[in-house]
Amino acid sequence: MKIKKNIAVSESGFLFDSNSGDSYSLNETGKEIVKLISANKSEKEIKDYFLENYDVDEAIFENNFNDFLIMLQNLRLTE
Amino acid sequence: MKPKYTIAVTGLNNTDNPGPGVPVIRALREAKDFDVRIIGLVYENLEPGIYMDNIADKIYQIPYPSAGADNLINRIKYIHSKENLQVIIPNFDAELFTFMKSEDVLKSMGIATFLPTIKQFEERHKSVLPKYGKKYGLDIPESKNITNLVEVSKLDTEFEYPVLVKGKFYDAYLAYNEQQVTEHFNKISAKWGIPVIIQQFVKGTEVNVVALGDGKGNTIGAVPMRKQYITDKGKAWGGITLTDEKLLEITHDLIRKTKWRGGMELEIIKTNDGKYYIIEINPRIPAWVYLAVGAGQNLPEALVKLALGEDVIPFKNYSAGKMFIRYSYDIIGDISQFEKLSITGEL
């Protein structure tokens, strides 16, 4: 999965899709995930990173992570 | 030293249904390559641009287009004798035909314009847009011109509700049933005459492009925008520039095929499955043109240069994510200004 090239994310977590004009606010976790996807990290690498750096159960992370990826796809932010 | 041009501009009605005059003038005042003296041409005494600071240097009333081309030309001759106009930029759909028809007369007086040809103007009318789409390979929603209420009752055999009910120059209303179409037909035909256009409603996001064609098939500039805030009249009260490559491709392609001359605005619906339907082609600069200036393309400046026969290098870039936000603001005038304009036709 890749974030489309016309998507810009600011340090504050503000995401702007210059193709559609839509904008979104990401929380810290969302911002970090989008940053990791943009850095071409695989889903496994992102999962490993979160499990290593945050106090989170693997099943709960996977559930939320998958929901988030589906949301990014539905909003046409990925390719 | 920069040259100074005297440019007449119409459309100073900076109301909640704004004309493009004021943003065009703001763009011209920011031109890099020339200075301007602006002559505001107005139809009504209360067009806000008359009273706004640093907009027009001088105001003249002109006759309505319905008074005929001769009356307009006589008035322009008088104004020209006082002001020595170099360029006129008409900004209303309803007056464009008269100005296009008078292009040669204006030229012989030494006044330049940069308008679409009558053929370009006529073939993109709302009432013939589907034919235009076929000719130039564009996706256009189905539409039908109706001239009387009998035809309204037959619409459900050709269209699925909702449909858009449109005036030939302005106004568009969404109608969900026959009764609503009848209501809008009566309102629109009383204001703009017939035909009234019934257009299939296409669900999606409305996006617009302001563009300038050089008349030889080249696009001098084009900036796409999405309306972010829309008034109850359907006018943009806020908008943001986009990077949508497909929109630019459609625009460049259309200008190349039609050899469009002058400013234009494309109104397009982008559907969720990624199709682009052109719903209107306005043959002039739109009222949100100052957003293009803010994004790096001073299209009114380029239009003036083209009108004066200068070479213009096409714009290559603009900034995405530039926004415009309109606002209302009370300015204080004096009855003496109103009196002077009413009595003398000048201010």
Image (cartoon, helix red, strand yellow):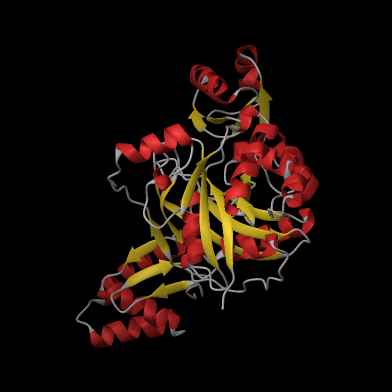
Q: What is the x, y in percent for residue B316?
A: 62, 74
Of residues B117 and B29, which is closer to you in this image?
A: B29
Residue B30 visible, this orientation: yes
Quadrant of the rendered image containing residue B144: top right
Q: Position of residue B345 (x, y in %)?
A: 49, 37
Which residue corresponds to the image point at 63% horizontal and 61% vertical from the top-left? Answer: B304
Image-based side of A17 in relation to B80, left or right: left
Q: Nearer the viewer, residue B8 or A44?
A: B8
Camera-side residue of B159 and B298: B298
Q: In which quadrant of the rendered image does the N terminus of chain B lie?
A: bottom right
Can residue B125 be seen in the rendering of this structure?
no
Instruction: Work out whether B196 lies above or below B236.
Output: above
Count of picture labels: 0
| Residue A76 spot, x, y in % from top left | 48, 63
Is residue B129 or residue B44 the one in the foreground? Answer: B44
Position of A10 relative to B144 (above/below):
below
Where is residue B80? Give x, y as percent: 62, 49
Residue furthest to the top in view is B150
On screen, residue A30 versus residue B157, left or right, reads: left
Residue at x 76% of width, y 42% of height:
B118
In the rendered image, the vertical position of residue B127 relative to residue B220, given as above or below: above
Quadrant of the image containing the C terminus of chain B: top left
